[in-house]
Image: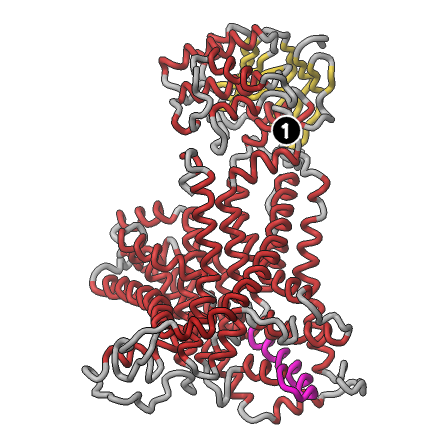
Amino acid sequence: MIEDGLSLDQLSISHADGKGLVQLSADIAPREVLSLMGPSGVGKSTILAAITGTLSPAFRLEGRITLNGRVLNALPPQKRRVGILFQDHLLFPHLSVGQNVGFGLPPRTPDRAARIQAALSEIGLDGFEARDPETLSGGQRARVALMRMLLAEPDALLLDEPFSRLDVGLRDRMRELVFTRARAARLPVLLVTHDIADAEAAGGRVVNLPE
Amino acid sequence: MLATDLSPGKQWGLAPTLTIALLLGPIAAGLLGTILPAFGGMRPDGQNGFSFDPWTRLWAEPGVGQALWLSFKTGFLSTLGALIGCFLLIAGWQGTRVFSRLEALLSPLLSVPHAAAALGLAFLIAPSGWIARLISPGLTGWTRPPDVLILQDPGGWSLIAGLMIKELPFLLLMSLAALPQIKSAERMRVTQVLGYGRVRGWFLAVMPALYTQIRLPIYAVLAYAMSNVDVAMVLGPSRPPTLSMFILRWMTDPDLTLRAPAAAAALVQLGLVAAAIMVWRGGEKAVAALINRGVESGTRGMGLRDTALTTIGLVLSLTAGIAVFGGLISQLIWSFAGRWRFPDALPSSFSLMSWERHGPDAVEVTLITLALAFVTALIALVLVIGCLNTELGAGRKMNRTGMVILYLPLILPQIAFLPGLQILMIQIGAAQGIFPVVLTHLVFVLPYVFLALAGPYRALDRRYATIGAAMGLGAVGMLWRIRLPMLLAPILTALAVGMAVSVGQYLATLLASGGRLNTLTTEALALFSGGDRRAIGVWTIALAFTAWLPFLLALMIPRIVYRNKSGLRHD
């Protein structure tokens, strides 16, 4: 158990009928990346759903999830301060790029427009506020999704194969951007991936989930 | 497995209970109000006591046996015809350009109320109708309308045709919604690679899976076709009429003692529909056995028969589309007709006279109809969104019982429980004002709104909700800032479907308001017996337009609101 960071203490997820699915214990310190690898169907994404608090009622969760000393188990997803990025970047299609980024800002943030502008500028998308997200390239969407999540000021970041849909060339740059930003924000990061190159780029420990 | 988003939010917990109560409450009350008077209860003179008198009175009525047979025959044959037409069309043409054109032609037909379609068909096929005018005197030599009974023929064939042209597009759209789920295109590719003809391959490999998906809508069509009054009133035979028309006549007769035999007849109608569904299920088993034999024989079914069958599917569907549209066009012409002598194909002069005479009334009734439809559909929409949200929170889809409850108002014949509901409401003095009408419409609007919205609502990627939650968005914010805006188009479509259903209600409006509320449907049907074609034209056009208008808005509003958002434009 650690005071700071994300801690999964004897986490065990089983089907509602009692059949076990996956078990994991891990401590992830701030700035650390833990990579979770394994074939599809072993429950990697289910672990992430347990941490975000969106586990289907078809599963049972045992064990304790703590973040910076707070026990998350009983908290609703909105109170957990756990950020997540998916392989599909899932920008809201009914909002502009600027509105998407602003979606992450806490309510009553002063100078919203300026914050959004600065955030877009940081990822090289100056002046993209009014654009339709559908008109962005895959790499641009990935960056917008990252900024949207970071502006919500999460205490931890979960990554659900966020690089797998990107072109090989883009993938390196996006990995570097994500990990750099996560370290700068002192976030513990849990990465779920198929790709050993992701884990290598993350530079942290790798846990292989058995089948 | 990424699953549900959120705690459903307590404010939604009531929605499913309330919805079930609003569906089952009126049905249960209506059945009670039918059963009691059928056995001597709830008499207008207060002399209650168990008796079989209503039944004796019913069977003493001449022509009741024939009416039973007519209801069964017209309902069964029209449903079978519509289903065969729909299946042959899909089997023969799905994936072709012809098919997408036909789909575009037939989809708008869904909004056309049954009454409007029936009145339109009557204008087409009557001895003095448009078809006779178009082919006379050239092909027929007629210079006067021939003295043949086409409309309201004793055999019920024009009624069968009228039901078929409306039910075929309905079954087609229900099928189209189900086909992607059963991977029909892939199945077809396999059968064709193995050398099967289109129709044979489709019936062996696609139809069984599709049928399971659309079984409940088919039963709903069968029940409606056997028990409707809005189409039977226009196209059905009159001496004797179908059983449902018998019931309606007695229910609206000034002689209140006729309500008891009407209630008994309503129970007979209920039994008749149940029996027909049993017979239909027997048919299902027989067809399943045939398909098994077909699979084992390995016959490929290529060649002439395949071509013939695909042609039949095309002809039936085209006929349905042309009949409904042609009927409405002839109504439109009549509404502007000045002098129109038989056998001229078109009026010799046009005038605004009919619109000037009936327009102001029609506008007023249109507004009433729209207001009633909007209020009802909106209530249904809120309840349905509540149910679907609860479903997301619970992380599982509605079960089979839920589906059956949802389809119950569509499978139970209206004529079997609405008269009972009226009798009951009169007894307790509740048959006043607009409230009973809204409540009764809701019983039929709710299922359609649910069916229209459930698919898109469930299909919305739940990871959007996870992202929203990760950014601290609560259940209310999730609904207003993510789900509703992203689902604007399907939500408006569901609202339009609900409004169209309400606009088309005849029996529910007539009985729940005690005949005191006039909507476009009740007015248009009331005019039919008068035979003033210009007046009927004005009201039927107003009716069809009013049912279609919400669909137009549902199509346009998202395009305007999201004109810069191409990610939402595909739906």
Find residue B247 and report its horizontal and vertical position in percent: 59, 82
Q: Looking at the image, which residue is at 53% across and 23% down?
A: A211
The N terminus of chain A lies in which quarter of the figure? top right
Find residue A105 and report its horizontal and vertical position in percent: 60, 20
Q: Is residue B502 magenta?
A: no
Q: Which residue is mark 1?
A: B473
Q: Is residue B262 magenta?
A: yes
What stretch of residues is rendered in magenta? B252-273
Q: Nearer the viewer, residue A182 or B194?
A: A182
Q: Looking at the image, which residue is at 71% across and 52% down?
A: B17
Main SS class of the magenta portion in the image: helix
Find residue A10 and report its horizontal and vertical position in percent: 69, 18
* Residue furthest left in the image: B138
Q: Looking at the image, which residue is at 24% across and 88% down?
A: B142
Q: What amino acid type is highlighted by mark number 1?
A: Leu
Q: Is residue B219 left or right of residue B90?
A: right
From the viewer's perspective, is residue B551 above or below residue B425?
above
From the viewer's perspective, is residue B488 above or below residue A94?
below
Q: Nearer the viewer, residue B212 or B260?
A: B260
The answer to whether residue B243 is seen in the rendering is: yes
Q: In terms of secondary structure, where does tag 1 sit? A: loop
At label 1, counting other C-alpha atoms closer than 10 Å, the crowd grade (few under 14, some 14-19, many 20 or more) is many
Q: Is residue B326 left or right of residue B116?
A: left
Q: Looking at the image, which residue is at 33% across and 62% down?
A: B88
Q: Chain of mark 1?
A: B
Find residue B41 and report its horizontal and vertical position in percent: 76, 82
Q: Is residue A49 left or right of residue B72?
A: right
The answer to whether residue A194 is seen in the rendering is: no
